[in-house]
Image (cartoon, rainbow, N blue to C red):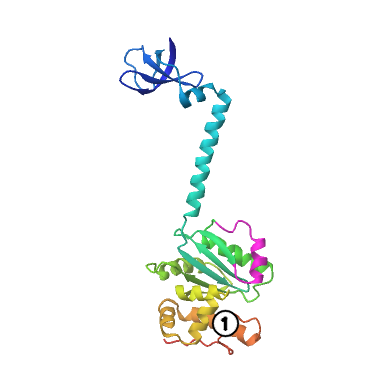
Amino acid sequence: MKKGIVMEIHRKYAILLTKDGSFEKGIILTAYADQGDEVIFQSVVEKSGWRSYWAKMPLSVRLSAIILLALFIFSFSLFYGANNSTTEAYVAIDINPSIELELDDDMVVTDIHAVNESADKLIEEVRSISERNVSSVLTDIMHESEDQGMAEEKTMIVGVSSENPNDKLGNLISKINTYIASIPEWEIATLPVPEEVRKSAQNKNKSMNEVMAAELANHHVEIEQTFLDITDADNRAIIDFFYGEEASDSDTNRSIEQEKMPMKLQDTE
């Protein structure tokens, strides 16, 4: 007779886990036994198949196998979850460096891309920039831009775009504007960017903010209406200053191909 813990109860026998970690078929001799109880039993058949193979393994080997299996399942779940996170919005930041952020539905930055060379240098200096709220990431980008001498004018354009046509960009921009309102000394404009403009900018390896500004300067009716619906006059003035000044300073290294003159965005108010 042996002692073991009841794992399964069948009509003519039970499966029990013995102290040495092996499984055995047996007849329970303890009265009123239930699953999970430690009982006295009598073995009825010789172990066979995988249970026999498992029982012959040293206890240390069995424990190691169980731990490795648990780690595999845990790692797989993390990998699967990470690769199924969806990007809900894109935020383009133009100072001198041009950077694009990917956001999930909690406004957490899941990825970051440098659009120009100066952004490459800035990203190298910013540690752990992803997996944090967009406002925290914006703060780091502004501080690092100042430290590297890239933000003499302290002017920034923040463009927002989304792949989901049901999203209301105004809601996301409103949240960003709430944060921006708390930042002193910086002139910051927020800019809604339609998905087709973002994709066009991506194909040209340019900032979606600049491509959007070019569309507005060319008075693209549908684009301009979206812009005027969400963006106020102060924002339009900052965008006009930011890109118009850039156009007058130099004819080289322009991101917007269409224009050869300073932009003047019309205020329709």
Furthest residue toward top? 1
Furthest residue toward bottom? 261
Instruction: Provide the residue designation for mark 1.
Output: 256
Q: Quadrant of the N terminus?
A: top left
- Left or right, residue 27 beside residue 160: left
Task: Assess whether residue 218 is covered by the magenta stretch.
Answer: no
Q: Quadrant of the C terminus?
A: bottom left
Q: Note whether 157 is above or below 4 in the view shown.
A: below
| Label 1: element kind | loop
Query: Which residue is depicted at the point 56% across and 87% down?
Result: 259
Task: Find the magenta span and give its range.
Answer: 114-130
Q: Toward the viewer: 231 or 53?
A: 53
- Left or right, residue 243 beside residue 45: right
Query: Which residue is depicted at the point 54% across and 28% down?
Result: 63
Task: Tell me where residue 133 appears, x and y as whole percent.
Answer: 52, 59
How many numbered marks have been drawn onto this rendered protein structure? 1
